[in-house]
Image (cartoon, rainbow, N blue to C red):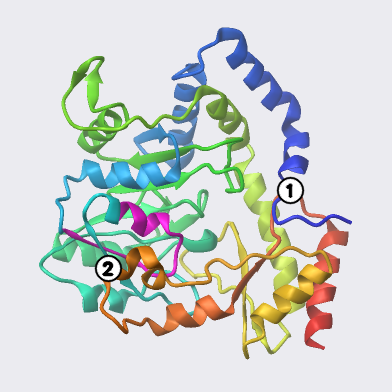
């Protein structure tokens, strides 16, 4: 039995006819850059998200960079982001000459800690980048209140939570990525909505921001060969858009399948004292981009080694806080430490969760985890 973290082959086989037809159409019309499928996917995605503007781009990292460029942030401006996240979130901040200010996260839901926003706010703070980690939303209502109070931009890193719904205290529901000033996402193949290469997108309800984002992503031009601002070359190619157009129709189905797998894990692993199953935030649905356990008593690495010996894959997202990465040492003082982030880096382990639920596979995974702790 071959167990995979993500079963892209099995997923493809179920939609093969539609995907192959979409790719073949791109080849037939040879519109490989900005072909019809790009616009069609953009419109479909706008409708799905309930957002005015989706601007496709080359990848999720570009999306974050373009978002910050569109907000006219200046060198030295400070951007608050969680320390427990993928490198891209903070990487683009540094690349633009801005300062990443890394704050701690919540121990149970892994999202940015609101007390950290207050603690690290300075006159130079200009924006917050909440990350909807592992598949559920950060506490956007409180983040927006804080941002409005202090005149800050909010850029959502939604690479792991496409399809998740956030419910406000007044009952209003919005898709993650459409709540802040700009949302950013990735279509990396293993994402919940993934293409067959690189891809990304930005989302906004602001007409002026949308216009500027489109220009920046297209060499700073609104009209060909007339460049209003310094931009970059970042586009979603037509073949990837054709794939995404097909897969978007199945996104809610994929999320439901991931939840079935997560529910089964919850039911069968909750009784193990030395692990903690994922907490589901009350105001957010979870799309389980990752199913992430916390392993207590320093046994995480031993568990991973044991599972590998049983041919069960697992991943550690993330083993080292951003502020301890060599690339970011310049932004923090010696001895800087965030206790929850460091605890999570030592405890988290993600086990397979994907769209192709196989009872035999999940039974093997659950059995071996139980065997390890018994």
Residue placed most toward the observer, 271 or 131: 131
- Residue 20 position within the rendered picture, expressed as x and y whole percent measured from the top left: 70, 23
Vertical placement of 281 versus 89: above or below?
below
Residue placed most toward the observer, 353 or 287: 353
Q: Which residue is mark 2?
A: 330
Mark 2 burial class by Cα count in 10 Å: few <14, some 14-19, many 20+: few
Task: Assess whether residue 85 is covered by the magenta stretch.
Answer: yes
Residue placed most toward the observer, 29 or 319: 319
Which residue appears at 31% of the width and 81% of the height? 336
Vertical placement of 240 versus 206: above or below?
above
Lateral position of residue 331 relative to residue 76, left or right: right
Specify the quadrant that holds the N terminus: bottom right
Lateral position of residue 205 relative to residue 305, left or right: left
Task: Assess whether residue 231 is covered by the magenta stretch.
Answer: no
- Residue 298 position within the rendered picture, expressed as x and y whole percent measured from the top left: 62, 87
Q: Is disc 2 placed on a helix, strand or loop? A: helix
State which tag comes first along the sequence, 1 or 2.
1
Q: Quadrant of residue 357?
A: bottom right
Over which residues does the magenta segment extend?
A: 77-93
Q: Quadrant of residue 251?
A: top right
- Mark number for residue 354? none
- Mark number for residue 7? 1
Q: Is disc 1 placed on a helix, strand or loop? A: loop
């Amino acid at each position: 039995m071959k167990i995979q973290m993500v079963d892209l082959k099995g997923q493809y086989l179920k939609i093969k006819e539609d995907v192959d037809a979409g790719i073949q159409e791109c080849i037939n019309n040879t519109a490989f850059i900005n072909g019809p499928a790009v616009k069609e996917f953009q419109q479909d995605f706008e409708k799905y998200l309930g957002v005015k503007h989706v601007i496709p781009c080359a990848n999720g990292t570009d999306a974050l960079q373009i978002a910050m460029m569109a907000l006219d942030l200046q060198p030295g401006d400070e951007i608050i982001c969680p320390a427990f996240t993928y490198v891209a979130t903070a990487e683009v901040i540094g690349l633009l000459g801005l300062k990443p200010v890394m704050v701690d996260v919540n121990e149970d839901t892994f999202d940015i800690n609101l007390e950290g926003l207050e603690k690290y706010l300075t006159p130079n703070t200009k924006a917050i980048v909440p990350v909807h980690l592992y598949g559920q939303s950060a506490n956007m209502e409180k983040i927006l209140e804080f941002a409005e109070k202090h005149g800050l931009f909010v850029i959502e890193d939604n690479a792991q939570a496409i399809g998740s719904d956030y419910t406000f205290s007044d009952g209003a529901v919005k898709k993650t990525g459409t709540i802040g000033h700009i949302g950013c996402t990735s279509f990396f193949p293993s994402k919940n909505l993934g293409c067959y290469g690189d891809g990304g997108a930005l989302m906004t309800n602001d007409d002026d921001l949308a216009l500027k984002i489109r220009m920046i992503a297209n060499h700073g031009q609104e009209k060909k060969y007339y460049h209003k601002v310094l931009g970059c070359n970042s586009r979603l190619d037509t073949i990837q858009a054709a794939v995404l157009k097909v897969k978007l129709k199945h996104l809610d189905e994929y999320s439901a399948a991931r939840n079935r797998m997560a529910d089964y894990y919850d039911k069968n692993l909750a009784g193990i004292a030395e692990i903690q199953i994922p907490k589901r935030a009350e105001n957010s649905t979870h799309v389980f981009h990752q199913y992430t356990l916390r392993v207590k008593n320093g046994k995480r690495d031993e568990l991973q080694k044991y599972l590998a010996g049983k041919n069960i894959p697992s991943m550690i997202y993330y083993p080292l806080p951003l502020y301890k990465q060599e690339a970011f040492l310049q932004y923090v003082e010696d001895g800087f430490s965030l206790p929850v982030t460091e605890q999570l880096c030592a405890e988290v382990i993600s086990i397979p969760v994907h769209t192709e639920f196989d009872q035999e596979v999940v039974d093997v995974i659950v059995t071996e985890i139980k065997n390890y702790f018994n």
